[in-house]
């Protein structure tokens, strides 16, 4: 459902702004924001439930897999818009991006694809809980780092990027605080 909503949002933006650089930049910015919200929800779900049990945090934790797959779908639309922009600009948009960003972003997409492809009970049984947990834990922290690099780096230039950077830091703080309070036998039980 969320994937269709993000795709419909992107299509509406392109209909209004046009299938051009302006329209694609609008889709890229918007899907970065929707992806951020979905990611933050999945990343912080368990910690938020542990600290502030409520109907919402219970729902978020129970539906964390769906929220994570929604993030993957949103970021898939984001990737398609980046590719379309590269095609329209003859590759100029990619040449403006540094190699570290392309490699770092590419690795993030590899994690997103692997995590989305293994977001089922069947995948957990096939991989084994330990390997599945390792993939999803490392992937979540890596993607957090990419978002932090992106928003944190921009916050140094423009204060408008500070709220997402602060939300990322708060989400990490919640995760680390809850993990430090968890008994040793429960550590590693969830990503």
Image (cartoon, rainbow, N blue to C red):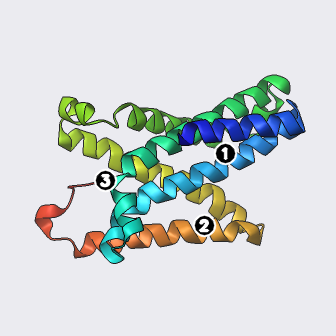
Q: Residue at x 37, y 60 (%)?
A: 59
* Residue 40: x %, y % from top left: 50, 58
The answer to whether mark 1 and mark 3 are in CB contact below 8 A is no
**Residue 123 location, quadrant:** top left
Which residue was labeled with disc 2? 165
Q: Residues within 10 Å of mark 1 (few under 14, many from 20)?
A: many
**Judging from the image, what secondary structure is the residue with disc 1 in?**
helix
Which residue was labeled with disc 1? 31
Mark whose residue sits in front, 2 or 1? 1
Q: Residue at x 65, y 70 (%)?
A: 163
Q: Residue at x 42, y 63 (%)?
A: 44
Measure the C-alpha gap from mark 1 to mark 3. 24 Å
Instruction: Tell which of 25 and 37 is nearer to you.
Output: 37
Q: Say whether disc 2 or disc 1 marks the residue closer to the N-terminus.
A: 1
Height in image: 2 above or below 179?
Answer: above
Q: Is residue 92 left or right of residue 102?
A: right
Q: Is residue 81 left or right of residue 70?
A: right
Height in image: 137 above or below 169?
Answer: above
The answer to whether mark 2 and mark 3 are in CB contact below 8 A is no
Q: Which mark is residue 66?
A: none
Q: Say whether disc 2 or disc 3 marks the residue closer to the N-terminus.
A: 2
Which residue was labeled with disc 3? 191
Would residue 23 be visible to someone looking at this image? yes
Q: Say whether disc 1 or disc 3 marks the residue closer to the N-terminus.
A: 1
Instruction: Tell which of 4 and 118 is nearer to you.
Output: 4
Q: Residues within 10 Å of mark 3 (few under 14, many from 20)?
A: some
Would residue 175 be visible to someone looking at this image? no
């Amino acid at each position: 459902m969320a994937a269709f909503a993000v795709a419909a949002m992107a299509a509406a933006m392109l209909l209004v702004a046009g299938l051009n650089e302006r329209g694609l930049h609008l889709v890229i910015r918007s899907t970065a924001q929707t992806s951020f919200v979905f990611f933050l929800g999945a990343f912080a779900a368990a910690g938020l439930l542990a600290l502030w049990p409520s109907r919402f945090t219970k729902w978020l934790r129970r539906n964390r897999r769906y929220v994570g797959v929604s993030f993957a779908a949103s970021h898939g639309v984001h990737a398609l818009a980046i590719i379309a922009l590269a095609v329209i600009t003859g590759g100029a948009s990619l040449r403006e991006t540094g190699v570290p960003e392309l490699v770092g972003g590419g690795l993030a997409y590899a994690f997103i694809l692997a995590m989305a492809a293994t977001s089922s009970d069947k995948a957990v049984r096939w991989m084994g809980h330990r390997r599945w947990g390792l993939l999803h834990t490392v992937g979540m922290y890596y993607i957090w780092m990419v978002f932090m690099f992106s928003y944190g780096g921009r916050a140094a230039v423009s204060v408008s990027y500070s709220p997402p950077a602060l939300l990322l830091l708060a989400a990490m703080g919640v995760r680390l605080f809850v993990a430090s309070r968890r008994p040793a036998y429960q550590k590693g039980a969830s990503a």
